[in-house]
Amino acid sequence: MDLIGIGKRIRAQREYLGMTRESLAEKLDITPKFCSDIELGIKGMSANTLCNIADVLSLSTDYILFGVNKDSLDNTISALLRKRPSSKLVHLESIIKAYISAVNE
């Protein structure tokens, strides 16, 4: 198993989402040191921790383990949207509709 590759994918998504290592560790109920060890490929993780990472970072376990992600755009957009208050999503919907309308002209 490529622990370094796994760690790089986890770190990249965490940074993309604007999360600190400490905030990720807190959400996963692990220590920041263990989170660091995972990201650096020093240690592996349990299946439970893998599933929690996938959930928190909105990634598939296949992508975390093997770098295979069929729905990367959907996952990336979903992850970004989950961080926004639902009251603000109506504004985003207007922006997307305006974008689509402009592109289709």
Image (spheres, grey):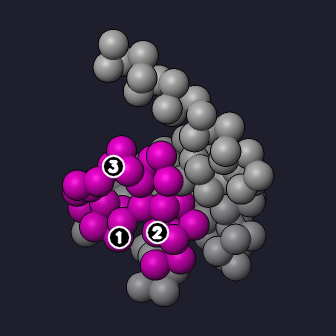
| Mark earlier in primary sequence (2, 3) | 2
| Mark earlier in primary sequence (1, 3) | 1
Q: Residue at x 51, y 24 (%)?
A: 98
What separation in Å lies between label 2 and label 3 (alpha carbons)?
A: 13 Å
The numbered mark at residue 72 is 3
Which contiguous range is marked in magenta? Answer: 51-78
Q: Is residue 21 above or below residue 43?
A: above
Callout 2 touching callout 1 (CB < 8 Å): yes
The kind of secondary structure the magenta stretch mainly shows is helix
Q: Secondary structure at mark 3?
A: helix
Q: Position of residue 43 (x, y in %)?
A: 47, 70
* Residue in front for this viewpoint, 1 or 101: 101
Horizontal side of residue 75 vs 35, given as left or right: left
Is residue 75 one of those drawn in magenta?
A: yes
Q: Secondary structure at mark 1?
A: helix
Q: Is residue 30 above or below residue 23?
A: below
> Which residue does the numbered mark 2 point to in the structure image?
54
| Mark earlier in primary sequence (2, 1) | 2
Given the image, on which type of amino acid does mark 3 rest? Ser
Q: Is residue 20 visible?
A: no
Q: Position of residue 24 (x, y in %)?
A: 67, 62
What separation in Å lies between label 1 and label 3 (alpha carbons)?
A: 12 Å
> Which residue does the numbered mark 1 point to in the structure image?
61
* Residue in front for this viewpoint, 12 or 59: 59
Q: Position of residue 28 (x, y in %)?
A: 64, 74
In the picture, the quarter occupied by the C terminus is top left
Q: Is residue 70 above or below residue 34?
A: above
**Which is more foreground, mark 1 or mark 3?**
3
